[in-house]
Image (cartoon, grey):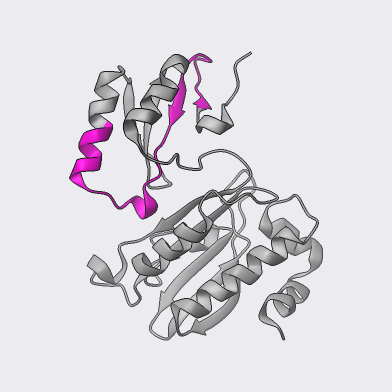
Amino acid sequence: MKKDILEKGAILQRDRETYAIAPHIPGGITDTATLRKICDVADRYGVKELKLTSAQRIALMGVKEDDLDAIWRDLQEKPGAAIGLCVRSVKICPGTTWCKRAVQDSVALGLKIDALYHAMELPNKMKMGISGCMLSCAEVTVKDIGVMGTPKGWRVYVGGNAGARPQLAELLTDGLATDDEVLALIDRIIGWYRNSGSELRLGKAIEQAGFERFRAEVLGG
């Protein structure tokens, strides 16, 4: 029986014959040349449908197994980490680049986080969200790690997910003044998770350890 093909970023579809693949588009930010290339490749290989995903990617649906290598070659893009035990996505709102309501530059910070962590292997899957204001368009409180902009700086949440058993993230800390402070904290969270000995999602690993213990270990107090 056919299965997902992890090394090719290919997810088996409902027909049990074709696959979906999705080039990595950091933060969902792209240009017209890339969009044209995706469309040209889709036409060339008879891709049945293009789907905008919740992870801010463009998925090519109904891809034939025999065409996978050629499509990736023609796309000349990295696969989005849509499957596997890794950082699956870093969702980013428009932030102060475009949004009139934003109070922090979520795009600049989010792209730094994406460059560091997208597709990084971890004990379980992980999703991140970066929002430039408290409207939280990147849905930070249902992400494993969520970063929210406020007028006073950055707020960091941990342990959320929107799966079969939804769980809201816990507020870890507030008022981080710089991107570097956020990046340093995320690095400590990831390090803690890797060394936790748990193979559960981050939120469940934190529950096992105890939130206050986790908080003290990653904040150093």
Query: Is the residue 19 above or below the residue 174 in the image?
Result: above
Residue 67 lies, with reference to residue 141, above or below; the image says above
Residue situated in front as seen by the camera: 218 or 71: 71
Looking at this view, is 7 or 182 the one in front? Answer: 7
Residue 58: give x, y in percent of width and height.
35, 38
Residue 200 at x, y = what percent?
Answer: 73, 51
Split into 4 quadrants, where in the image is the N terminus? top right
Q: Is residue 130 left or right of residue 86?
A: left
Give percent across and percent down for residue 193: 70, 61
Q: Is 127 within the magenta?
A: no
Query: Residue at 72% across / 59% down in the picture?
Result: 194
Residue 22 magenta: yes
Q: Which corner quadrant holds the C terminus?
A: bottom right
Write the start and end of the magenta stretch as one range: 11-38
The location of residue 61, given as percent across then percent down, is 39, 25
Corner quadrant of residue 35 = top left
Drawn side of residue 80 relative to residue 212, left or right: left
Q: Quadrant of residue 204?
A: bottom right
